[in-house]
Amino acid sequence: MTSAPILYDLITKDGAALSPWCWHAKMALAHKGIAAEVKPLDFTQKDQVIAAGGKSFPLMVEADGTVSDDSKIITDRLEEICPTPTLFPGGAASHAAYDFMHRYVQTILFPTVVKIILKDIPDVLDGADRDYFIESRTTRFGKSLDEVCAQRDAHRETLSTQLDPFRKALAKGGFISGDTPAMADYLLFGVMQWARVCSPYALISADDALTPWMESLLDLHGGLGRATPAAS
Ligand SMILES: N[C@@H](CCC(=O)N[C@@H](CS)C(=O)NCC(=O)O)C(=O)O
């Protein structure tokens, strides 16, 4: 890759990257050693970027104008233009496993985590962004953010069961992707980092088998994840 791509990234009032899918893309870029020019955006600044060709965030624009407007498209594009180090150790089988896991994370884990942390997200936004977020999500879910999260303790239990395949995968040692962390790890990390940055409510307990894995992912790539503080 000749010059750095631009990555549009959604941020909190304190400038912290918050979107699970933006974290997914940021970890993929860091894995490749590509220093993207990150352009932080408030939710309410995004319309101008969408008008320029994207549909949601993360949004990556390369020097030649190529636009990738989805975390999975960005991942595949990065693998195409910069094949090493690979995001899919094991080749096609690993990519197929990632495809499946992406669906699992988007359709099973993400909706459960929404029901746990959604009501806390306005606290990390302010002004017009906060108003936009509350209004858009109230419309999307057809109820208030407090109502979406009314059973959050029960949903935390559900999440714990939904995370069992990951605990079992980690029981053999190493990472979800195998001996070294890669895309399957970054997928789960994106969702857990979103919760860490947006909500003081702990998704998992300190003695959860996933905690050491999360700590090591926070330290990865020069502590990229840990550099963004947890919500308090
Ligand atoms: N499928 C997309 C999902 C991206 C997505 O939903 N991004 C959200 C942030 S988490 C967004 O752009 N939201 C804009 C808004 O809410 O106005 C991906 O994986 O990139």
Image (cartoon, helix red, strand yellow):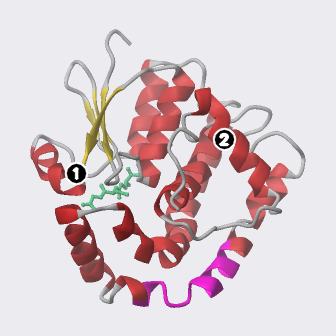
In front: 31, or 37?
A: 37
Residue 19 is left or right of residue 161, and the answer is: left
**Residue 92, x across and y down, in percent:** 62, 35
Q: Main secondary structure of the magenta part?
A: helix
Residue 96: tell me if it is visible: no
In front: 47, or 42?
A: 42
Name which residue type carries label 1: Lys
**Residue 95, x across and y down, in percent:** 60, 40
Distance of mark 1 from mark 2, alpha carbons? 29 Å
Question: Badge 1 is on which residue?
Answer: 55
Residue 60: tell me if it is visible: yes
Q: Quadrant of residue 134?
A: bottom left
* Magenta span: 147-159
Outermost front residue: 232
Q: Is disc 2 surrounded by few (<14), some (14 to 19) or many (20+) residues within 10 Å?
A: many
Question: Badge 2 is on which residue?
Answer: 217
Label 2 secondary element:
helix
Mark number displayed over residue 180: none
Instruction: Tell me which residue sits at (41%, 86%) in the image.
Output: 146
Q: Earlier in the sequence, mark 1 or mark 2?
A: 1
158 in the magenta segment: yes
Name which residue type carries label 2: Leu
Q: Quadrant of residue 222?
A: top right
Residue 75 is left or right of residue 46, and the answer is: right
Q: Is disc 1 surrounded by few (<14), some (14 to 19) or many (20+) residues within 10 Å?
A: some
Instruction: Name above or below for residue 14 compared with residue 39.
Output: below
The quadrant of the picture occupied by the N terminus is top left
Instruction: Tell me which residue sits at (75%, 47%) in the image.
Output: 213
In front: 81, or 198?
A: 198
Instruction: Name above or below for residue 195 compared with residue 71.
Output: below
Instruction: Tell me which residue sits at (24%, 81%) in the image.
Output: 139
